[in-house]
Image (cartoon, rainbow, N blue to C red):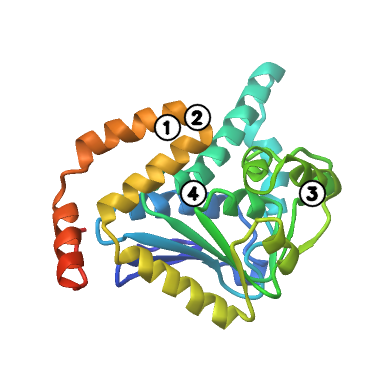
Amino acid sequence: MQFETLSVTLDHHIAVVRLNRPDKANAMNLAMWHDIRSAFRWIDDTPEARVAILEGEGKAFTSGIDLKMMMGLGAQIQDDCDGRMRESLRRVILDLQDTLSSLERCRKPVLAAIHGACIGGGIDLITCADMRYCSSDAYFSIKEIDIGMVADVGTLQRLPKLIGDGMARELAYTGRKVEAVEARDIGLVNRVFESREALREGVLEIAAAIAAKSPLSIRGTKEMMNYARDHTVADGLNYVATWNAAMLMSDDLQKAMMASMSKQTPEFKD
């Protein structure tokens, strides 16, 4: 796949999506928003891709939404009717939200590997990933409050489920910088690696472990965990019962059981 603002590779069932505007600190311009959605739709549709890694090129993971894009919104939504102009702005915001939700809609797990700055829209982006890892030089900031706006594409909805309501409010109200170790301590990232090289190696290892599992079971597990996050325990139990009634008796189950009995490594169909 060829993209204007991303580089995307697929090797050994691992898709690597790299934000690729290093001269602009990977600022998220309109093309990048469109590319992100297209890339994760492609990963979802590609059987050979069993897991995805999201990372950034250059000195920063991302500096957040491109301010030039923000400044151009006025012309994009211009209308003589104030009501229609406001409706257009709402549709723009909903479309940006949908772009980031593409990481959640992707049936394959998405691992975010973060180095350097992860600011503003970058927080919206990584909270959509299944897991987050960072290097020791990483830092995080919900920067929207410092430019006089309410973060509107996912941070305020997803972050409290990751780090708790009180801490999420502190970060959203103050915009303060969160260094790598604190990010780990509050649960924003799973692990901190000493360097960017160690980060890439470590996340690749985790991705490879996931890619070796039953793809059907991994996809089902992501579906169940996303559903459980947003529903009651009773709803989640009912859904997983229905899911396994439909999906449990698969070739993957037989292969995994036979491999376990013979102490071999099973190989699964994509």
Q: CA distance from mark 4 to mark 1?
A: 32 Å
Q: CA distance from mark 1 to mark 3?
A: 30 Å
Number of the label disc, if any, that sits on residue 231? 2
Which image quadrant is residue 49 in? bottom left
User: Is 144 placed left or right of 162 in the picture?
Assistant: right
Q: Position of residue 45 (x, y in %)?
A: 29, 50
Secondary element at tag 3: helix
Q: Position of residue 105 (x, y in %)?
A: 42, 43
Residue type marked 4: His
Number of the label disc, if any, that sits on residue 171? 3
Secondary element at tag 2: loop
Q: Earlier in the sequence, mark 4 or mark 1?
A: 4
Towards the viewer: 211 or 99: 211
Do callouts 3 and 4 mark residues in contact (Cβ within 8 Å)? Answer: no
Towards the viewer: 18 or 103: 103
Residue at x-position 67% and y-position 38%: 152
Q: CA distance from mark 2 to mark 4?
A: 29 Å
Local packing at callout 1 (Cα closer than 10 Å; few below 14, some 14-19, many 20+) is some
Q: CA distance from mark 3 to mark 4?
A: 28 Å
Which residue carries the number 1 mark?
236
Q: CA distance from mark 1 to mark 2?
A: 6 Å
Local packing at callout 2 (Cα closer than 10 Å; few below 14, some 14-19, many 20+) is few
Residue at x-position 86% and y-position 48%: 174
Do callouts 2 and 3 mark residues in contact (Cβ within 8 Å)? Answer: no
Which residue carries the number 4 mark?
34
Local packing at callout 4 (Cα closer than 10 Å; few below 14, some 14-19, many 20+) is some
Which image quadrant is residue 161 in? top right
